[in-house]
Amino acid sequence: MSILRNRTATAAIVAVAAGALTLTACGGGDSDSSSKDNSKQKEDAKSQSKPVQIGDAQASTGPAPDVEGAKSGGVATVYQATDFSHLDPGQIYVSDGKLLSRLIFRGLTQYDEDENGNLTVVGDLATDAGKESDGGKTWTYTLKDNLKDENGNPINSADFRNTVERLYSNYITDGPTFLQQWLSGDGTTYRDAYQGPDKGKHLPDDVLETPDDKTIVFHFDTPRPDLPQMLTMPGYQVVPEETDTKEKYDSAPVSVGPYKISDFKPGKSMTLVKNTQWDPKSDSVRHQYLDGFNISMNHDDEDQTKTLLADQGEAKNAMMFTGQVATTQLQKVVGDKQAMENRTIQGYAPYVWQLNFNMDRVKDKKLRDAISLALPSDAVFKADGGAYGGEVANSLMSPTTPGYDESFDPFNREKKPNGDVEAAKKLIKEGGFEGKSLVYAYGNTPERQKQAVLIATALEKIGLDIQKKEIDSATWYEQVGKVKNGYDLYMTGWGQDWPSASTVFPPVYDGTQIQDGASNYSHINDDHVNSEIKRIQKITDTDEATKAWAELNEYISKEVNPAAPIYYTKVFQIFGSNIGGIRYSSDSSYVDVTRVFLKK
């Protein structure tokens, strides 16, 4: 899942209770002093990259167990850097949208998370995580009783048929495509197989079947054991047929979760209030302790950190969604013992920030290799939260992804974490690239602006002419997701949607998926990569598939190099003193919003 901090994702790894310190790196310091600690963290992350468990009907039955010390009432304030890029579930594939979706949307399945961060897939609107038959090619879901949307309309199987079929519509461009492709064809061919409900036709029953009001049956041409995990994604949460306004749904969605949108001023604020139609007996995970949330936008990380650390007035009842302790405020937060012990959470997120090469424009691999070698990875990640914000990345695979190999280091990140300038200069000279002009696009947040200066300066040192282009971070992925985006270089972050490399390489590196809104941001279209992705996706043995994905990862970086790994992300957040129930979520990679309450 794409990540826009201050803006996909799903399965992460390390979960910690509020105040527990799982990160061993110290604030500040040079790269050498933290390298040993970083190595241990990668080992810890890898040890947590284990498959999720599948829950039964009993585990899917609400209400959710009470959070210790929880009280009802009050409104929490949420500080958010930018607006949400989408509100239509079918368009959500980024982190802040996922946190919001946990409050207002529901799907067939969801994750139940224990105090140690272990994830179990359970039924959400469905009675369980799904029943498979025909060797895993057929999956059947039965809806729970008395489900309603915020308007009191019953939720039935026709609503889920609508939810799936609308994903084929042309206006759905930015969400996940796993389900559509599994049902109707690889790459972009699923759009040719079915034109969407706007044409007045349904998917055939041998693909999607709704034999009665409470039953949904998926039929695949190959076993799909990961369907329960995939259906937890925001992109597959229900859009009731009766209230589906198609393109307009993106600005005024209908809630089926514990909260609903009562007021929305795009780019400024959003108010969530209780959805009185939500039945806690149908929900084994979510709570409705708060009367609502006031989401205030245009607060960058520094503003959020300063305000929350001061803990005055409204800020006592305030929290971050995807905000991060700002680099400039790191020492103050770390030095505040009370805040560190009671008001912060930390975790190792699954994301790899990488510099994408637009391969339609940056066609010479030697140039791509030179840029990759020159990147000041250590300085770049420290501009995004210091030592608590990440660590140097050696691979396009995260340490949280099964198959990750720390020894694979094609761009010498371990020995040259701030770039191998001489090796890069050599390639620039060999290729005759001195003075070549490249457009580097970056988001308009303080972190991205600082990183842009660092990256541009490093690339200018090796002889390139870098033209910086600033973009609104609220629409970052929409802009760089255009096939003809007009940029040469741009950073994106990607993390697994569940613990499998099958959620990394197909969406990001499969050339058959190139289209506006797709996640192949580099436009790599390599025959070997495409065929290997197709082959590995059919491997049912997990160990064999994991090994094959790791081998493909090495091929992609060594032989093609469509994107250069820069850093892995960690999360370090701070909250107001009156916010209760905070913990790091293995599901969202940020705070677990389903259990928040006010202490008094």
Image: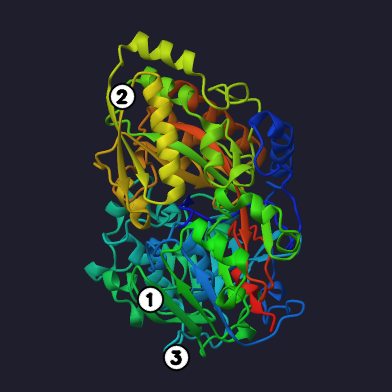
Depth check: 125 or 435 in front? Answer: 435
Per the model, the C-alpha gap separating discs 2 and 3 is: 55 Å
Query: Mark 3 = which residue?
Result: 152
Depth check: 454 or 428 in front? Answer: 454
The residue lying at 69 percent from left, 78 percent from top is 64
Q: Of the residues shown, which amino acid type is indicated by label 2?
A: Lys
Other residues around mark 3 within 10 Å, as few (<14) / some (14–19) / many (≥20): few
Residue at the top extreme, as displayed: 430
Taking the image as shown, residue 431 lies to the left or right of residue 374, namely: left
Q: Of the residues shown, which amino acid type is indicated by label 1?
A: Pro
- Is any part of residue 429 visible from this angle? yes
Instruction: State which quadrant residue 65 falls in.
Output: bottom right
Helix, strand or loop at disc 1? loop
Quarter of the picture containing the C terminus is bottom right
Q: On screen, 458 above or below 8?
A: above
Depth check: 424 or 387 in front? Answer: 387
Per the model, the C-alpha gap separating discs 1 and 3 is: 14 Å
Closest to the camera, between mark 1 and mark 3, is 1
Query: Mark 2 = which residue?
Result: 363
Q: On screen, 163 above or below 397?
A: below
Give residue 280's position: percent from left, percent from top. 62, 84
Numbered mark located on residue 253 in the image: 1
Helix, strand or loop at disc 2? loop
Numbered mark located on residue 150 in the image: none
The residue lying at 52 percent from left, 71 percent from top is 78
Give residue 451's position: percent from left, percent from top. 45, 40
